[in-house]
Amino acid sequence: MSDAADSVPVLSARGLIKKFGGITATNNVTLDVRRGARHALIGPNGAGKTTLINLLTGVLTPTEGRVVLQGEDISGLAPHERVRRGLVRTFQINQLFVSMTPLETLALVISQQRGRGATFWKPLGGDAEVARRCEELLAQFHLSEVMNQRTEYLAYGKRRLLEIAIALACEPRVLLLDEPVAGVPAGEREELLQTVAALPADVSVLLIEHDMDLVFSFADRMTVLVNGGVLTEGSPEEIAANEEVKAVYLGHEVAHG
Amino acid sequence: MQAQQTLIRSNRFRPWEPVLWLAALAIPVLLPHYALIVNEIAIVALFAVSLDLVLGYAGIVSLGHAAFFGLGAYTAALFCKHVSPDPHLGLLVAIAASALLGLAASFTVLRGSDLTRLMVTLGVALILLELANKLDWLTGGTDGIQGLVFSPVLGLFEFELTGRVASYYSLGVLLILFFVARRLVNSPFGATLQAIRDNRLRAMAVGIPVHARLVSIYTVAGGMAGAAGALFTQTSGFASLDVFEFHRSADLMLMLVVGGTGWLYGGVVGAIVFKLMQDALSSITPQYWTFWLGLFLVVLVLVGRDRLFKPWTWIRRGR
């Protein structure tokens, strides 16, 4: 990997601080996600991963610090405006449109993404381009056979796939994956792992995950978060060899188990 | 292009739809006695469809939808009295006025829980009721505005006592606005509303401007409810405080409970069932008809709409 060409950060957190009353949930986090990266964010429970995601996506406003996407300061933008600029997330707990089918869900998200979300006179799916993109995504995420079932009746693994398909339908430049395989039963896991591995190369991914197998098979860069702050950052090999990480992170995990 | 066909098929007309509309249009001619009740049903159906847009599609509960109905009713009355007796112009002005109220009121329902929305919407309707009561130089106070005479519909058909012209006028307006609403909810815009109803957090996370969407639909629904109010004034010849009363908003909720939310026809079906029951029961037992209506609602909710109206499922063993 040629560092000079790939080191252009597509998403940067600059000195992010978030305080809830007296508690500092995010403590001066600076983080660069490089173009095309497969970047993993790990840390024990309570390390502040979710708060950081919420700061990046605009759900929470930082007490201090900035978020920069492709050179543009997006700190002041609302969540949906960040999505329009290509910063898209998935959720640890499925957040789906349960009364709609996967096909309808993707059609509406794609319509919205292409600036036709306010079209009120043409039927959903009236646009052949939108329908074609729906079919591509449904096939890519193994959802074609269930595209006309209401989402609430889908198997958990399928819902998990739809969770990621929705995010990809937003045409992200940076995709934040929040524990994509959390809670997926063993039988449905493989399909999901393959799909995550096959995400388009031009989409930069920030992965938040507890599953170390997935993290080490997927990531080319890792950041370790402890107590709201960055403990260290490096390649998977460096992180695996880091004594401090072993002590703080793995030690915590052992104590948990 | 299977996906596209499936998507488009869902807003194609069902065979029973034209049957329903043709039956509605035939009744005032075939059964002239029912012309007045057809008129009443068409008006509340339009009102209920308007609430369904907000409640069934955007997920905003409201106990004060009568605010828009009432403003439409009074606007139509005042327009007739002071400006012009033309019902079409009056209807358009009433729609514009209540849409404006919808736009202003939408900002009160953007945030908060269902409970706060119930209170806020109820409050808006009560404020308007009290304004209509107090501003008697304008609204006639408790007497309302009476003795209005509107010019003929389309310049040809004079409103008469049998209610036939009135029923066709109301049915015509209902038909047009219903299909506008139908078109709206089946569009990408309508789909983004349902997304907001299903999961507001995710709707935001896929780039849907949630507030802008809610403001738009609340404005449209306000205008539609105002149209229903204008029809009420124009076909009855008066407007009184009753149009703002709480029971109007509450009855409307009941109609949507009966007919079901989120498919537009729920409002129409609910209005038909509610009005016919009201008519039949109150002629049998004028004092106690609300008892039977209440009993029906309790049974409906306990048994479930699907099972109640599909008796053949009763024999099958329940699991």
Image: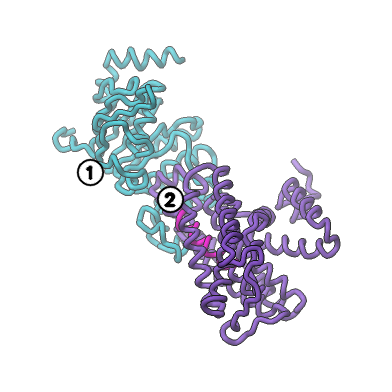
Q: Please state the chain letter of the residue tagged with numbered disc 1 in the rendered image.
A: A
Tell me the amino acid under the disc marked 2: His
Q: Is residue B120 left or right of residue B266?
A: left
Q: Quadrant of the C terminus of chain B?
A: top right
For residue B162, the mark is: none
Q: In this rendering, is residue A5 above or below A247?
A: below
Q: Is B215 inside the magenta-drawn segment?
A: yes
Q: Between marks 1 and 2, how big is the CA–CA gap?
A: 24 Å
Q: Position of residue B82 (x, y in %)?
A: 53, 76
Residue at the location (30% across, 24% down)?
Answer: A27
Q: Who's the residue at 37% across and 47% down the image?
A: A80
User: Farthest left residue?
Assistant: A4
Residue tagged by mark 2? B211
Which region is colored magenta? B214-229
User: Which residue carries the number 1 mark?
Assistant: A72
> Circle 2 sits in a helix, a strand or a loop, which is it?
helix
Quarter of the rendering containing residue B72:
bottom right
Palette colour of chain B? purple
Dot 2: chain letter: B
Magenta span main SS: helix
Give the camera-side residue of A145 and A56: A56
- Which chain corresponds to the colour cyan? A
